[in-house]
Amino acid sequence: MDSATSRLRKLQGILEAAQALVAERDLDRLLPLIVQTAARTVEADRCSLFLVDHQKGELWSKVAQGLGVREIRFPMDRGIAGAVAKHNKIENIPDAYDDARFNRDFDKQTGYRTRAILCVPMRSLDGEVVGVLQALNKVGGASGEHLGVFSAEDEELLMALGGQAAAAVNNALLHQEIERLFEGFVRASVVAIEARDPTTAGHSGRVANLSVGLGEILPRAEASAGRWRGSILSSQELQELRYASLLHDFGKVGVRENVLVKANKLEPFELDALKARFDAILLQEELGFERRKVAHLLANHLDRAGFDAIEEEYKRRVAELTESFNFVLGCNKPTILPEGTFDRLGVIAKAQYLSAASGELRPFLTDNEVLKLSVRKGSLTEDERREIESHVSHTFRFLTQIPWTRALKRVPEIAYGHHEKLTGKGYPRALSEPEISLPTRMMTISDIYDALTASDRPYKKAVPKQKAFDILLDEAKKGDVDQDLLRVFIEADVPTRSAQPQSAP
């Protein structure tokens, strides 16, 4: 092959490589690709790539061929690569051992013998040095024998590749920075959610871990996956599910705080008013009976039995009022009320006392208090429950304002459906089974499980893992949650897997 043909082949190789480099946005995959292309282009035995860390004034690399994958860092003004980065000039050295800047320690550590070095700056379009490409030992032929020094053509080709590599590295670094920026935004949003509702702190993160854990285990759950057998979520789809899970409750910022963190049926100020009213009623009763005692003594001071009867009647009345008040306090708790509770509340509410402020007769309980205390289960009235449920729509409206990338465009829709049920009885849209996506089904199971087992809710007690599984299995029997996914969730023990420390990426 003549030199012109060889040069053309190498230039075509650089163009093909440039297309591949620009398409690769993952820096950990991009850097080895650059090194392999550089070694092939200039027929080098080994190549290294060092990136410039301007903030620290260092060069660093994890892709020096022959040195394993450990990270190398050194000051930018040291060594041959440092000189190239600092002065933005090519260094073509025929014999490394004749150059005082060459560090022989690497050869000693690896047993390698460095001879010729070609080191070029990787320049961006504006001339900034992004990194350094370093080729070691020109080789060729079938046996790969050493051919001496690198040529001027090698310098030109490696510089051309270095320019393409610089653009690709900058692109990958920018992509990395954007990902870190967005990750920070998501985490800041989660902090905002948890600041708004401290009682559920950690819930979003746990739901994300459970959902992604289920997504990761699903392809390996051949026997139990049922209709989802063979289903695989790509890394991008898992990230989409993770973001949707982390942000699924963001709409709580649109719910009134007193409703959001409501532990009992009456709000604290309402309970204080109720206590003050019963204290006033007890005081009125005491004053009333004291007047009766005085009147009795004035009318017939020798009738001790009548006096004692009044005293006993007073004690019974105080006990009756106290017991009624304690019953009301019991109704205030977010427990499931037994049959007959509402009837007794109605009787207590109809009793009257004389208001000291207006001089009018008032009921023991107001209509609003009766309404709230009559909640059969939980602590929320129907209006308050609808307000809480509106957080899903608030979440969707918020998430649709974000310019998601194509890889993450389904995040709003996945989060929107986490309170839907396959039977069509969920909210806010009452979607039916065919309309609910696989990622949303995963998140629904994870959300219910964490809500059941979380120990930080003031309005309910946490249930053990097995009890939570039993409750979810009942939901699956009713058709509300996906039975196949739940089987995988339980058999793979996703909660235990997701609770294990995650290895660093």
Image (spheres, rainbow, N blue to C red):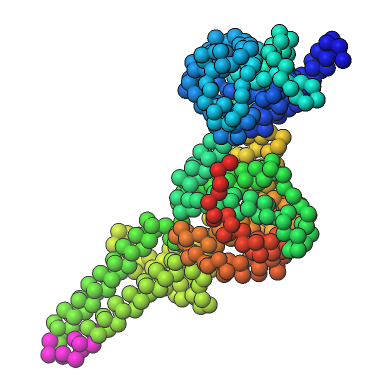
Q: Residue at x 49, y 69 (%)?
A: 335
Count of all numbered marks drawn on residues in the image: 0
| Residue 286 location, quadrant | bottom left
Vertical arrangement, residue 441 with respect to residue 305, above or below: above
Q: With 311 as the anchor, is 277 left or right in this view?
A: right
Name the spot of residue 94 as percent of width and height, x first. Answer: 63, 12
Closer-to-camera residue (415/350): 415
Q: Residue at x 61, y 27 (%)?
A: 112
Whether residue 310 appears in this view of the structure is yes
305 drawn magenta: yes
Name the spot of residue 261 as percent of width and height, x first. Answer: 46, 53
Name the spot of residue 189 as percent of width and height, x first. Answer: 53, 40
Vertical arrangement, residue 264 with respect to residue 39, above or below: below
Magenta: main secondary structure: helix
Q: Residue at x 63, y 53 (%)?
A: 213
| Residue 319 location, quadrant | bottom left
In magenta, the rendered stretch is: 301-310
Whether residue 54 appears in this view of the structure is no
Closer-to-camera residue (165/486): 165
Q: Residue at x 52, y 67 (%)?
A: 463
Vertical arrangement, residue 137 with respect to residue 415, above or below: above
Quadrant location of the N terminus? top right
Q: With 362 as the anchor, is 219 left or right in this view?
A: right
Closer-to-camera residue (393/98): 98
Quadrant location of the C terminus? top right
459 drawn magenta: no
| Residue 90 location, quadrant | top right
